[in-house]
Amino acid sequence: MAIVQPVETSNGHRRLRVASPATKEVIGEIPVTNLDEVKAAVERARAAQKKWAARSIDERARIMYRAVDILSKKQEQYISVIMRETGRSHFETVMMEIFPALDSLTYYAKTAKAALADERPGLHLLKVKKLLINYKPLGVIGIITPWNGPFILSLNPTVQALMGGNAVIVKPSEVTPFAGALVAELFREAGLPDDVLQVVNGDGETGAALVNGGVDKISFTGSVATGRKVGEACGKNLIPCTLELGGKDAMIVCDDADIERAAGGAVFGAFFNTGQFCCATERVYVHESVAEEFTRKVVEKTRALRQGAVGEFDLGPMIWPRQLDVVERHMKDAVTKGATVLCGGKRNHALGELFYEPTVVVDADHTMALMTEETFGPILPIVKFKTDDEAIRLANDSPYGLSGTVWSKNDERAIAIAKRLDTGSVCVNDSSITYGAVEAPFGGRKTSGVGQVNGEVGLRGYCQAMPIVIDRFGPKEEHVWYPYTADKEKVLQRIIKWVWGTPIGRWMS
Ligand code: NAD
């Protein structure tokens, strides 16, 4: 049985049945929200948003802090819902979902007031005017999210949009609807007024209905293929969007890297969330002089991983057959083209249908899908390089550009390499943790996305930066107003000559 299955329609609604990826037990059913209901939700949100925007940022922050208290106290309840739907370990659920959620709530509650306060930058030339920039909510934000971080990827943009004074409609993945719905539950309990945050449920049809449902912005996280469709629809509707899409992150291990740490980082980076992480380490390029030691340590550490479904374990199952199919296709193609499997390389049938063993592969190259397409599974291919230039060329030889990592004991060298990577972010001597560094603007280049989320950039992205230009002295008329005369133009020409034609003028302008 698939993890999400359509079941019979009732009361005019399609219904989806959701099952656990680890045990295949049925978790529950969701009625699919149809187009009319999505539109009605947007209308309710629009009415509620006006009152929400009228509340001070301090009042909005108080609700975030209440959510922090509730989530801290009731975290076990939240963890069990997320674990059931994802098959993840308890530890990983705390690390990947609860910890960053508490951080996001607190960080934006604390910083939004300063980030969204009116600004009054001086004007460099028009000294007779004043400029005020007001950060105004956009209105109703549609947030569409994937299954691989079902709570945090729904909560984090919601927090930013709400702190900006917007109403929000979340469409969680149909694979993990109950974990997505926790966001609304949390804010309801924290005292967020009705309809400021709503959840609509369903698959792509509901997502498309939300994009076309009259919202003012879409914040989308998911695959490149769906991101393209969402981007096209937003273009047609002339609404802004951020598209946080897939990746094929490269890890570059220099000859002077701490090999023990780099090997540990590679294993964590590749197998965290069973490799189903947008910034997973999907390709390793290691300097030939340290490749043998590095690969030996990676294989040792991979063999020590505990795969499981209950109790203490390191990695769980793949989330659904669709993703497992990609993994198996990439592995088959790689082996056919000459790759060597050092460990793993097959399903772990003893645990269940969706368990794939953590796998290390060498002798891989860029003719293989494993090195060029997003795998989103527990596979770590290792390739040797001779020079930094070659490593950078290989890392950039990808349609994706989400994140990446560089490992060297020489920070300057690592930063110089990082700057030459065509990606949205890079981590030095750590796995890709940019999304967890809330201050850091996060987004991809090339097919990995459009726009950035998080930090001040993300928060302001949910607002219109509205400039208000104010006259200072109120003369009866301005020099450039009618009538246009030759004398008036002479004055303009004198200004041009002085401002851009003299060193002091250029310095002052
Ligand atoms: P997906 O694109 O299949 O689905 C994402 C969401 O879009 C789901 O809620 C889905 O129902 C919805 N959807 C599907 N068709 C739609 C349409 N036509 N219009 C609007 N919405 C539609 O992605 P997925 O399989 O759920 O997630 C995995 C992908 O997400 C991977 O590629 C991964 O790299 C990416 N991802 C990216 C980031 C990031 O921040 N860059 C983070 C996490 C995951």
Image: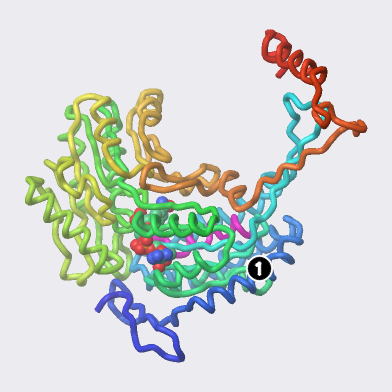
Question: Which residue is located at x 33 percent, y 54 percent?
Answer: 272
Left or right: 260, with 163 as reference point: left
Q: Which residues are magenta?
A: 147-162
- Image point (34%, 34%), residue name: 406
Q: Is mark 1 within 8 Å of ligand 1?
A: no
Tell me the quadrant of the picture where the C terminus can be found: top right
Q: Would you place residue 445 above or below residue 171 in this image?
A: above
The residue beneath circle 1 is 46
In the rendered image, the quadrant that contains the N terminus is bottom left
Identify the main secondary structure in magenta: helix
Using the rendered image of the protein, determine whether residue 248 is visible from the camera's viewpoint: yes
In the image as oriented, which residue stretches furthest toward the right?
476
Query: Residue 165 at x, y = what percent?
Result: 68, 58
Residue 443: percent from the left, percent from the top? 45, 46
Image check: 326 left or right of 435? left
Up the image or down, 125 lies above or below 93; here it is above
The residue shown at (28%, 26%) is: 256
Picture quadrant of ligand 1: bottom left
Left or right of residue 307: residue 506: right
Identify the element where label 1 is drawn: helix
